[in-house]
Amino acid sequence: MLLIKGGLIVTAERRFDADILCDDAGRIARIGADLEAPTGCTVIDASGLLVMPGGIDPHTHMEMPFMGTTASDDFFTGTAAGLAGGTTSIIDFVIPDQGQSLFDAWRAWRGKAEKAASDYGFHVAVTHWDEQVHDDMGRLVREGGVNSFKHFMAYKNALMIDDTVFLRSMQRARELGALCTVHAENGDAIAFLQAQLLAKGETGPSSHPLSRPAAIEGEAAQRAITLAELDDTPLYDDTPLYIVHVSTEEATQAIAAARLKGLKVYGEVLPQHLVFDDSVYHDSDWLQAARHVMSPPFRPKAHQKALWGGLISGQLQTTATDHCCFCQDQKMRGRDDFTKIPNGVPGIEERMSVLWHHGVVSGRLSAEEFVAITSTNTARIFNLYPRKGCIAPGADADLVLWDPSASRTITAGALHQNVDYTLYEGMTLTGLAVKTISQGVVVWDEGTLRAERGKGRYIRRPALGRGRPLWQKV
Ligand code: DUC
Ligand code: ZN
Ligand code: ZN
Ligand code: ZN
């Protein structure tokens, strides 16, 4: 048992002084003033610290085979790094191989993730359509604890689907009470622009953002919303659409307009899009520019204001990292052709600090809003709440003890991600996970990481929508 004494508890709703007793099953047993420590119980002094729900990162790609190589963080190193940064759960992606059944792919990814140090779940990507996909989606929702499916409108000749497949999948997801998530960029337009740039000899990383302009994200986001609207089943508490890594003003506006019409459309923001702009691609050092190659790319500065506005207003609800690490030698695969630079950047370990510093310390967000966008909103949208994203008796004891005023300068050597750089190198950030508690156990303790291989559990997420009972037992 673990007793956390003297901290200031911050949830998405409020802040209050209380102690928290965690039981040996890894759940919160009691919350109250001056709780007595049962015999044999470890006591942690949290005075001066905030006690918040551990972060949930709903968008990671551990050991993902992609663009001819494999992401360097595996499920152990990646989740361990998350714990060091205050993140206690992830939702990763099952990406089926060409022609592989979704259910078999899910089983294979369950196998890879057995080494995870923190709790995890999966979205499953729909990359083609046939009867088997229709049936596998049903099996995954009913037997697999999967309530979200991923769709790529980009990555032509690889992961991209056309609108027909997307419509079929949306209809099926709605039938099942599952949620559709989407990478919204127009893959045909990207392929066209990439070919044009290469034909002109524009082979460097500065062509990456030119091949994926903001407008084509806006177009795809609006198209996804339009397709979701075609089915005239009311979206009320039904099958929401969740747009991952919203990086533009255009997509933010499309989401806000849809929400005003009563459509349940959600948007996710990555901290890196709030902090970096497209000038990163003009670095004279090829490798420094290539380190930033991810999709969607970093945008002209004006978009950052729109993303902050989206988070502040609640039109955009969640933050994630799209954590997809490629070491510098992997980035070198695209030395002569920017379209071959593996897309992806690290960030799971830095996310909470970046958002605290640029969100709360800057005065844009309250501490409660920070909890909402790093944990609680995600738990609610993906039906993990109140097991996760919540500090209440019965909830999982996944907590972060946070020093709101500690500062440190970020450097790759001090991080635990299995990758040889950080986007935030040299940046001084205020706000730090002092201790992270996962399943009632201290796994990150003032600089010492005690992540345990295989300790993470697969978390089943029940269906949403019509099938959901009005009241759900915790
Ligand atoms: N974008 C990335 O940068 N990496 C992984 C997949 C994606 O959509
Ligand atoms: Zn059907
Ligand atoms: Zn994506
Ligand atoms: Zn992604």
Image (cartoon, rainbow, N blue to C red):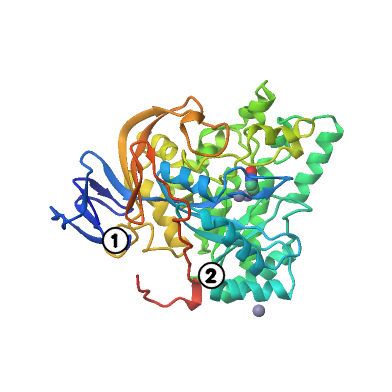
Q: Position of residue 301 (x, y in %)?
A: 56, 32
**Amino acid at dot 2:** Leu
Work out whether residue 260 or residue 198 is closer to the camera in this orientation and state it: 198
In the picture, the disc for residue 290 is none
Distance of label 2 from label 1 (alpha carbons): 41 Å
- Among numbered discs 2 and 1, the one appearing first in the sequence: 1
Work out whether residue 232 or residue 366 is closer to the camera in this orientation and state it: 366
Q: Residues within 10 Å of mark 2 (few under 14, many from 20)?
A: some
Q: Secondary structure at mark 2?
A: loop
Q: Position of residue 290 (x, y in %)?
A: 67, 31
Q: Which residue is mark 2?
A: 235
Q: Residues within 10 Å of mark 1 (few under 14, many from 20)?
A: some
Q: Which residue is mark 1?
A: 24
Position of residue 163 relative to residue 451, above or below, is: below
Q: Secondary structure at mark 1?
A: loop
Position of residue 352 relative to residue 389, above or below, is: above
